[in-house]
Image (tube, rainbow, N blue to C red):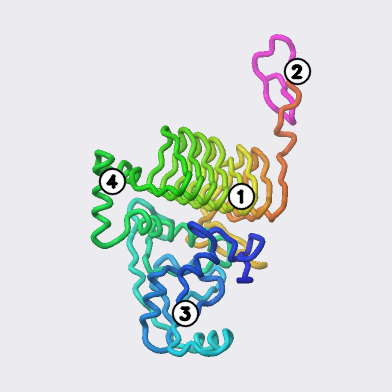
Amino acid sequence: MNETCEGLLGPLGERTFLDGTVAEWRLRTAVPALVAPPGLVWSASAAATVAAMAGDVRGAPEMALLGPIAALTDAPVWLARLADGAGTPAERMARALAAPELRFDARERVLPGVALPSGPVRVADAWMFPVGHWTQLLWANLLTLGPFLWERLVGGGVMAPVRIGWAALRAGSFAPEDVAARLNQLGPGARIHRTATVEGCILGARARVGAGAVVRGAVLGDDAVVEELALVEGSVLGAGARVQRLAMAKFSVIEAGAAFAGIMQLGIVGRGATVKHGAILMDMAFGQAVRVRVGSELRAAPHGLCGVCVGDGAVLASGIRVAPGRVIPSGLEILGDPAQVLTRLDLPPGCGRAEARGGRLEPV
């Protein structure tokens, strides 16, 4: 897989997706009879639905939230089933493009209590998402996280109510948060401090959650760490990623080896990047939709809002605030304004009130 994800460096296949990478996910859900366009991820359920169709056909899901995400880069969203899979990859793709398109039910459900400016959030079992742009990678992770966690932690069929009932019995309560706290999945060597709150999460091998931390509805890759008193909700952490003490990451993706210590919502921190304490990555523009750069154009972000993309290996200093929809270029180090750092603290005797100006204190 040689495609890239705009806003981030390196092959698209290396980008973080749920409990692994895009390439690992595509391999896991691949079906020999199917042809997929570049830069697409899909669920096993979607692959099975298309594979069951007859003849040469392109299957595309009916998903309410998909349109703005795919339209950002005009990306194709379909899987093609070829009755005869013979031929070179180019010949098979040509046949796929010529096949008639058939829409199918993605089995969407409204996610209660969560809404976007464009309407309620819906999650689906038979989903497909393009991931050629950083905002698409973000939304693909977020909109598939719920079904993924449910499948891994609860499952389907007759076992789902059994697992939920057993979790409620162990919790001694039917409160959703109490039940979710008993539905975590921990890999070998994973550790959760006894004072931490962890609800409905998957922790990879040797992942760790520190004292007083709160982690809800998240996937932590192998060796990922959520330090003491940090907050992580509805997010995906790649292998070795670290959310540092007192940081807050909500509905975001922190890729492998990154260290995040700021405040972020609806953002991506690329591989090996660093965001220092006090940095704030914004996600909304008051009175107007957020716009993102696609190639040389500015386009409306999917569903009108998104956060910030911190490129691979970039460093964002303490106290920096970044407006929504922006990309910190990979490898760039951004330092704070020296004028905002107090370096002169000398004041006249008896001064009881002072104002910070240009790095020094002035009597008021």
Q: Amino acid at mark 3?
A: Pro
Q: Along the line of sight, which residue is nearer the eye, 159 or 176?
A: 159
Residue 298, picture quadrant? bottom right
Earlier sequence position, callout 2 versus callout 3: 3
Q: Residues within 10 Å of mark 2 (few under 14, many from 20)?
A: few
Q: What SS does tag 2 mark?
A: loop
Callout 1 environment at 10 Å: few (<14), some (14 to 19), or many (20+)?
many
> Mark 4 Cα within 10 Å, few/some/many (few <14, many 20+)?
many
Residue at label 3?
32
Q: Secondary structure at mark 3?
A: loop
Q: Does residue 200 appear left or right of residue 91 in this picture?
A: left
Q: Nearer the viewer, mark 1 or mark 3?
A: 3
- Region of the chain picked out in magenta, as a range: 346-364
- x%, y% of residue 360? 74, 26
Which amino acid, mark 4? Ala
Q: Earlier in the sequence, mark 1 or mark 4?
A: 4
Q: Give coordinates of residue 2: x percent, y percent.
A: 63, 71
Which amino acid, by three-letter code, is at mark 1?
A: Gly
Q: What residue is drawn where x is 44% and y is 60%? A: 143
Q: What residue would you read off at disc 1?
A: 257
64 sits left or right of 254 in the view: left
Label 2 and label 1: CA atoms lie apart by: 42 Å
* Front of the two marks 2 and 1: 1
Q: Give the foreground label among 2 and 3.
A: 3
The total of numbered circles placed on residues is: 4
Task: Quote the CA–CA distance across marks 3 and 4.
Answer: 38 Å
Query: For the point 40% across and 49% down, which residue is it?
Result: 185
Q: Is residue 18 left or right of residue 172?
A: right
